[in-house]
């Protein structure tokens, strides 16, 4: 049996609403997008939500809204996807990389504070030499769907007087609390701006899409204007009978709006967000039961003060238990028709960051020790018990052949 890495969960509700949208005659940003924004904001406890065509667009607009400019510095984890740092480069600003926590793989707050202090003092930081431009923002990322130490990050942000933009591409829903007696807080309510992804394999999907949420009116307004060419307020309404043909350009903006066709999918997916989460949670629990005694892998840890989204089930190969390396293990799983992935090779090891900044081996030891061992196993709502058993049995059979 072939097991894909991911299969989207699309029901009649999404299909019907897309058809209704097509029949309505309104395809681009319009009433469905407005409703999606309102329902999303309510869901995550944010005052404002802006639907966009990707999380990358959301991160870009967030940095623009907090005032990042050429030459500034923005702190980003090295253990993240391309988008988290590339948006900093859009401004010709510098992404300052920081190592990850050995358990969660989210940004290490102690190292974050050290890095911010070094930047402020004009001292060298891993991979970079002074002089630096002003520090303008911190972008923690919630690896695999488990929230970073947002209290720790908020404390550092306060000490250095900068806003926090959360890269929540993997998280919906997810919760954190400061300690066992503290109330749970939901992703979307803990940062100055939080950016979500609705890419095909994310917790909820619109095919491609994203959302930026914030409590601040000024950030929301700036992001809305910049998401549509820098046109003055509510430009999309200009083709409706509520709007006017008149607009003014107040800045050279971007074209990042989400279509109503995508929002039709998003509205239905949002209604299912908790049900999809429950399925992923159950699958994660089942992997844990089935793989508990398996010598060849370390399983992901869910901290007591987090509720994980389980976007990824990212395991670590135990090198001493195998005669083959991670890459060969993935190839062997592929030969059994089981598709896995890796999240990620750290940014500082990629050619662009090496060439542009002189980043390279030896700078971020935790990320470097973890990444050669990472494998993301298939996990998605609608995955059958038989498919999951196939993955577990595949791993066990490979361990009989290649284990030690
Ligand atoms: C951590 C992280 N941030 C940002 C993104 C970008 O999301 P999008 O494809 O919606 O732009 C991704 C996409 O996989 C991601 O994994």
Image (cartoon, rainbow, N blue to C red):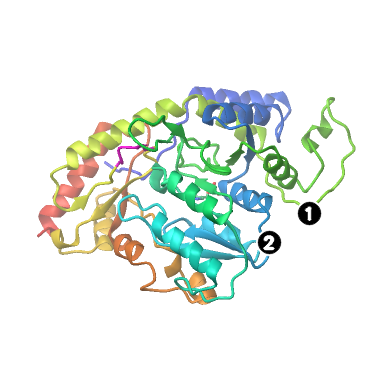
Q: Secondary structure at mark 1?
A: loop
Where residue 69 is drawn, which disc sits there? 2
Which residue is pictured at 47% across the width and 71% down the height? 125
Q: Where is residue 43 shown, x and y percent of the image?
A: 53, 27
Q: Judge depth for marks 2 and 1 and give the one in front.
A: 2
Alpha carbon distance from label 2 to label 1: 14 Å
| Image side of residue 117 versus residue 229, left or right | left
On the question of residue 108 being in view, the answer is: no
Q: Nearer the viewer, residue 110 or 393?
A: 110
**Dot 1, crowdedness within 10 Å: few (<14), some or many (≥20)?**
few
> Looking at the image, is 307 positioned above or below residue 294?
above
| Image side of residue 143 versus residue 21, left or right | left
Q: Nearer the viewer, residue 397 or 303?
A: 303
Q: Where is residue 65 shown, x and y percent of the image?
A: 68, 49
Residue extending farthest to the right is: 246
The region drawn magenta spans 302-308
Residue marked by disc 1: 252
Q: Where is residue 236 shown, x and y percent of the image?
A: 77, 36
Specify the quadrant that holds the C terminus. bottom left
**Dot 2, crowdedness within 10 Å: few (<14), some or many (≥20)?**
some
Q: Nearer the viewer, residue 233 or 190?
A: 190
Q: Is residue 306 magenta?
A: yes
Q: Is residue 203 magenta?
A: no
Q: Is mark 2 within 8 Å of ligand 1?
A: no
Residue 348 falls in image quadrant: bottom left
Q: Where is residue 90 shown, x and y percent of the image?
A: 64, 61
């Amino acid at each position: 049996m072939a097991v894909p890495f991911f299969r989207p969960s699309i029901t009649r509700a999404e299909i019907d609403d897309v058809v209704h949208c097509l029949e309505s005659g309104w395809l681009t940003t319009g009433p469905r997008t407005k409703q999606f924004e309102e329902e999303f904001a309510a869901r995550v406890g944010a005052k404002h939500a802006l639907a966009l065509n990707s999380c990358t667009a959301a991160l870009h607009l967030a940095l623009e809204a907090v005032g990042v400019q050429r030459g500034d510095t923005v702190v980003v984890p090295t253990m993240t996807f391309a988008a988290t740092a590339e948006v900093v480069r859009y401004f010709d600003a510098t992404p300052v990389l920081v190592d990850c926590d050995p358990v969660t793989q989210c940004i290490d707050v102690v190292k974050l504070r050290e890095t911010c202090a070094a930047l402020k003092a004009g001292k060298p930081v891993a991979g970079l030499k002074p002089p630096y431009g002003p520090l303008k923002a911190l972008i923690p990322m919630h690896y695999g769907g488990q929230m970073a130490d947002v209290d720790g990050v908020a404390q550092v942000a306060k000490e250095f007087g900068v806003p926090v933009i959360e890269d929540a591409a993997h998280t919906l829903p997810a919760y954190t609390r400061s300690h066992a007696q503290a109330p749970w807080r939901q992703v979307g309510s803990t940062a100055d701006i939080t950016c979500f992804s609705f890419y095909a394999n994310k917790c909820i999907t619109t095919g491609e899409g994203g959302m930026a949420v914030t409590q601040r009116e000024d950030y929301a307004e700036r992001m809305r204007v910049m998401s549509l060419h820098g046109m003055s307020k509510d430009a999309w309404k200009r083709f409706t009978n509520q709007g006017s043909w008149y607009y003014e350009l107040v800045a050279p903006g971007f074209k990042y709006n989400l279509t109503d066709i995508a929002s039709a999918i998003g509205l239905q997916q949002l209604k299912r967000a908790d049900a999809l989460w429950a399925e992923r949670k159950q699958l994660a629990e089942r992997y844990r039961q089935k793989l508990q005694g398996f010598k060849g892998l370390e399983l992901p840890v869910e901290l007591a003060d987090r509720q994980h989204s389980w976007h990824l089930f990212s395991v670590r190969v135990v090198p001493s238990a195998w005669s083959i390396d991670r890459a060969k293990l993935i190839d062997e799983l592929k030969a059994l028709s089981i598709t896995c992935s890796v999240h990620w090779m750290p940014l500082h090891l990629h050619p662009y960051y090496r060439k542009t900044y002189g980043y390279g081996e030896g700078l971020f030891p935790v990320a470097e020790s973890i990444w050669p061992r990472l494998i993301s196993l298939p996990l998605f709502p609608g995955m059958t018990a038989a498919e999951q058993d196939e993955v577990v049995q595949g791993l066990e059979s490979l361990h009989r052949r290649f284990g030690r």
